[in-house]
Amino acid sequence: MNPSDFTTISFPGLGIEINPVRGFDIFGLNIQLYGIMITLGLILAFLYGTRRGKQFGIKNDDIIDGVLCIVPFAVLCTRLYYCAFQWDSYKDNLIRILYIWEGGLAIYGGVIGAAIGIVVFCKVKKLRIGAVLDLTSLGFLIGQSLGRWGNFFNREAFGAETDSFLRMGLLNAKTGVTTFYHPTFLYESLWNAVGFVLLHYMSKHRKYDGQIALMYVAWYGLGRTFIEGLRLDSLYWGKFRVSQMLAAISCFIAVACLMYFHFIKQPDPSKMQVRIYEAQQKENENG
């Protein structure tokens, strides 16, 4: 199934029919809307981080440095994750792994890469990893919610055929036939948007560094476990959908950790990064 064969997109239950462009040219340079949506998500996540960084004990200068450190790790692992599970397509021509403009990115790879980048960044900056993960997780939800609309413009990341109310129709330009699918990109975008609202509120009542990050892993993992099961373009490891399996496992581990910290070992709030930051600010004010 080639996404380029599809033209008009319709949502009959909502009375919507549109034929969005995939990209446009500026001075001979092709700009893809998929990339624009990802970039927009990154910018909004960055702006959100600068507005709330101090509430997590992180200075804006550190946020800027963090973006410069973490984003390359995320982009690299997003591509490598995809290629690893599509190895037959790349093993005979490894240079194609670098052809990122051809498409082939996996969001879970980006999350893993960002986590690696955060560990490196925190070691260098001497920041608590949990605090940085908490703030970054909220940025993830912003970026993932917007980024999924790049799949809309590309006519990809949809699910199995359905006749449900929220079904998405794709017109095949070659056959003239419209087939209706689960708009899984939309499901995930809405799931992430709701998750952002909930965790934004919860982040104002954090009890320890890393709490919001664990909630993010649990929330995203739960939604992805079910949504991935509907998709037609999943990456497989044998008979298993890789992202679905990873989502379910990560959700289970995150919930177990949240329960452990809530019922068994309650972390000391005085050791949170924001408390360290406040103490440093007070010391600076007192000279």
Image (cartoon, rainbow, N blue to C red):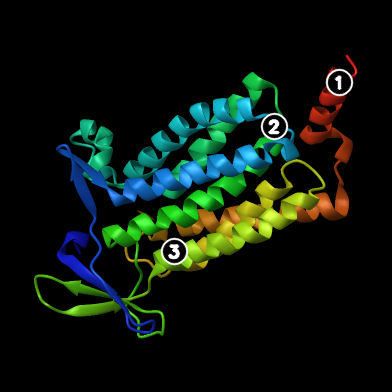
Q: Are marks 1 and 3 in contact (CB under 8 Å)?
A: no
Judged from this view, the residue extending furthest toward the right is 286
- What's the residue at 40%, 47% (across, down)? 38
Does any portion of residue 203 appear in the rendered image?
A: yes
User: Which one is in front, 214 or 255?
Assistant: 214
Res 58 label: 2
Q: Which residue is mark 1?
A: 285
Residue 183 lies, with reference to residue 116, above or below; the image says: below
The residue tagged with tag 2: helix, strand or loop?
A: loop
Image location (x, y in percent) of residue 179: 24, 78
Q: Residues within 10 Å of mark 3 (few under 14, many from 20)?
A: many
Residue pointed to by mark 3: 228
Please name the residue shown 83% across and 53% down the image: 262
Q: Which sits in the foreground, 192 or 53?
A: 53
Left or right position of 226 against 277: left
The residue type indicated by label 3 comes to: Glu
Query: For residue 199, which quarter of the picture?
Result: bottom right
Looking at the picture, does residue 217 appear above or below residue 79?
below
Q: Position of residue 123 (x, y in %)?
A: 65, 22
Q: At label 1, which amino acid type do we have?
A: Glu
Horizontal side of 116 relative to 198 (left or right) equals left
Residue plotted at (63% across, 19% down): 124
For label 1, count other residues whose C-alpha is less than 10 Å away and answer few (under 14), some (14-19) or many (20+): few
Label 2, label 3: how far apart the Cα atoms are: 34 Å
Is tag 1's residue or tag 2's residue first in the polypeptide sequence?
Answer: 2
Q: Indicate which label's residue lies in the foreground, 2 or 3.
A: 2
Dot 3: what SS? helix
**Which picture quadrant has residue 182?**
bottom left
Q: Nearer the viewer, mark 1 or mark 3?
A: 1
Residue 7 to residue 54: above or below: below
